[in-house]
Image (cartoon, rainbow, N blue to C red):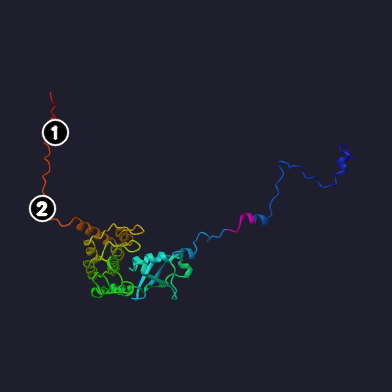
Amino acid sequence: MTRGMTSADVAGAGARPRRPQGGAAGARAAQPSSRARARAKGPPADPRASVPSPDLASDVFSLRVKLEETGELFRVANCRNDMTVRELKEELDLMVGIPFNLQRLHFLDQGILMDDAILKFYDVIPGAVISLCIWHYDGWTELVLAAVEGDPSKLSCLGVSEDTFYRTANSQHFKGEQWRQWTSQRAFVALYISAHRGHVDAVQYLLELGANCLGKSPLGRTPLHVVAAMGRMDCIRPLLEHSANIHDRDAKGETPVTIARRLNRSNFERKMFLLYWMIKCGPRDPNNLVVREAPKKPSPKALSKGPVLPP
């Protein structure tokens, strides 16, 4: 036995060292395996991760809408995959000039697109053509065609005045107030569409016949709203002369002024604003103007004296 060594030391000379209890302060912590480190770090960073997906980048797109009864083709911008059919019809009310409640939309087949469904549900793709039809009841199709054409002689035969002989299966029993509401609604729709197309003669004829330019579509829009959307300069004056208001708000809170501004029709907006105030203020006869003299200014000498105080 070596000097200075105990028997316990000799017994444990060839044994495995004992694990320290509680761990020494300077002991190295157990290192995780390379696989564990890879899991902790996650997948390697992709340098293309910051680039938006092509599907998301093209989320806003344009559609074409064909009015089947006339063959007209309209472009509708700012459409989205999550856009509902109702939202699309609300935009068509303004851009195509067909009131919301008369629209019937189809895509690819003859199935009607439901208002609450989104465009993605029907697999509508950018640039697709959606068919817009008019509901075939109560003679609306014939009235829409006449208004699109802008022919006053045809409009006069389609129930736009109370003294008309035109009847439908629905209206043949109407009398009194019910009859007046039916004819006034048809006159308004004819005015709405004619104004959208810029048919000044038809607009003037309908206004003189009693069509209400303050009437509103189901979305709260007046004929002046669609005139502003399309920039129909010639239709501004007749509507304003019959009390149309440039500040009327639709269901979305838009006025003819804000619509013209949103669609970058600055010249139209300026002309509409000037005509509105010219007509609102009325003509001014120079002979009736009262000339008022301005008060005389006190002389510098009087100002230097200052006010005279009582004794």
Foreground: 28 or 299? 299
5 left or right of 170 in image: right
Estimate how packed mark 2 is, as few (under 14), some (14 to 19) or many (20 or more) residues with alpha carbons within 10 Å. Answer: few
Location of mark 1 (residue): 303
Q: Is residue 217 magenta?
A: no
Start and end of the magenta stretch? 39-44
Question: Among all residues in the image, which is located at the extreme right?
Answer: 1
Estimate how packed mark 1 is, as few (under 14), some (14 to 19) or many (20 or more) residues with alpha carbons within 10 Å. Answer: few
**At label 2, which amino acid type do we have?**
Asn
Q: Quadrant of the C terminus?
A: top left
The residue tagged with tag 2: helix, strand or loop? helix
Q: Quadrant of the N terminus?
A: top right
Q: Is residue 40 magenta?
A: yes
Q: Quadrant of residue 301?
A: top left
**Residue 191 percent across, percent down from the top left:** 27, 68
Foreground: 243 or 59? 243
Question: Among all residues in the image, which is located at the extreme left?
Answer: 287
**Residue 208 percent across, percent down from the top left:** 21, 67
User: Alpha-carbon distance for marks 2 and 1?
Assistant: 37 Å
Foreground: 199 or 18? 199
Q: Quadrant of residue 37?
A: bottom right
Foreground: 77 or 133? 133
